[in-house]
Amino acid sequence: MPRLAAPLREAQRRREKRAAGLVSDIRLSGINDLLIRLDDLIIAFIDHPSFKGLAFLLRRSAADFETALEATISGYSSVAFDAMRDVLEIEYLLRDFALDPANITNWLDADQKTLKKYFSPVKVRERLKTAGIGNFGENAESRDYRAHSMSLHLSPHRVGLLPGKGLARDRLFPNDFGFWEIFLHAHGLISAIRSLTEALAPESEVHHLASQDSALLAEARKDVQHTQELYYSMFEARNLLRGNRPGEACAVLSIALRDAGAIRGELLTESKLEAFYDEAIRVAQGEVSPAQQIAVLLVAILNSTDGQ
């Protein structure tokens, strides 16, 4: 069955290649720490009467993170994206429970009609927005939810920042997309759990456990954010180039390289432009990395237009 074998073989090839390279990667360590923390919280929820009925939501979110990791390693970024939408819905529901704890029993006892009328995703988001929780305006969180909705629902339009269905292109940034989603929504979920335990049982062992910070998770999230910011800078620069604004494109890329620590910030002055150019070439000719990809584009723009 060659039609079926081809994508399965390619997914297996990517899985083996990427898994080998991730053995000592901070991102894998961060996700492992996240799953251990969720396992501990599941046990704590089961042991506390106020949270026992919600333990399955944490178990479901842990399964979502496992799914997203496997999909990311195999190259199915869109599967990871969809799994994280589920985590996002769980996060919003937990925040709604923290806002009004009576909704826990109302939700657990609800029939399908009540769930649709009072606990559909749109109703939950409306309550959070009214309470000023979640910031559902023109910010990153709101845009993230809209992006998930755009990915889920059929449309004749392709949004460049979203992963396509099936195997993603085997390139540097598409391969990292799932990690961006995992750490973004891990942060949101842990924050929501903490809000819930504080609202219901602030002196309990459950809240103490939920309030603990993970250095590994924070470090991994910071590492992922650097890569994500570099990708967005490349996307923004390309849009500026299409608008015939190469100077602004150079500025966006230069700042991204500075913020990532790839180029010294003091070189971004008019008196040191030559040294900055030499440094950009050095990064562009180095080992393949997110910063190297950005530097390649920057040097190409500078060589073709002098950055003007």
Image (tube, helix red, strand yellow):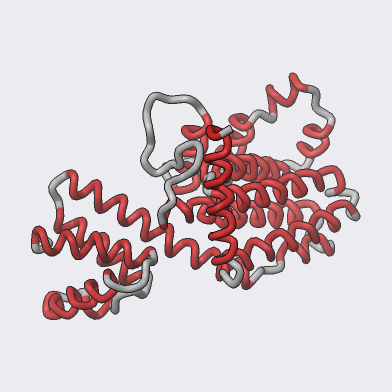
Residue shown at 24%/80% (left/top)? 266
**Residue 203 location in percent, x, y?**
82, 63
Answer left or right for 158 relative to 198.
left
Left or right of 59: which side holds 119?
Answer: left
**Residue sitting nearer the eye, 143 or 35:** 35
Residue 119, compared with residue 240, is above or below; it is above
Between residue 124 and residue 295, name the one nearer to us. Answer: 295
Residue 195 image position (x, y, % from top left): 69, 54
Residue at (43, 57) in percent of width and height: 228
- Residue 20: give x, y in percent of width and height: 58, 65
Q: Residue 103 sits in which quadrant?
A: top right
Q: Residue furthest front?
A: 1
Q: Quadrant of the N terminus?
A: top right
Q: To which quarter of the image does residue 290 belong? A: bottom left
Of the pair 86 and 20, the residue shown nearer to us: 20
Residue nearest the observer in this picture, 265 or 100: 265
Q: How many marks?
A: 0
Q: Residue at x 73, y 51 (%)?
A: 196
Q: Which residue is depicted at the point 12% across and 75% down?
A: 270
* Residue 218 image offset from top left, x and y in percent: 58, 68
Asked if residue 301 is positioned above or below residue 83 in the image, the reply reads: below
Q: Is residue 113 above or below residue 182?
A: above
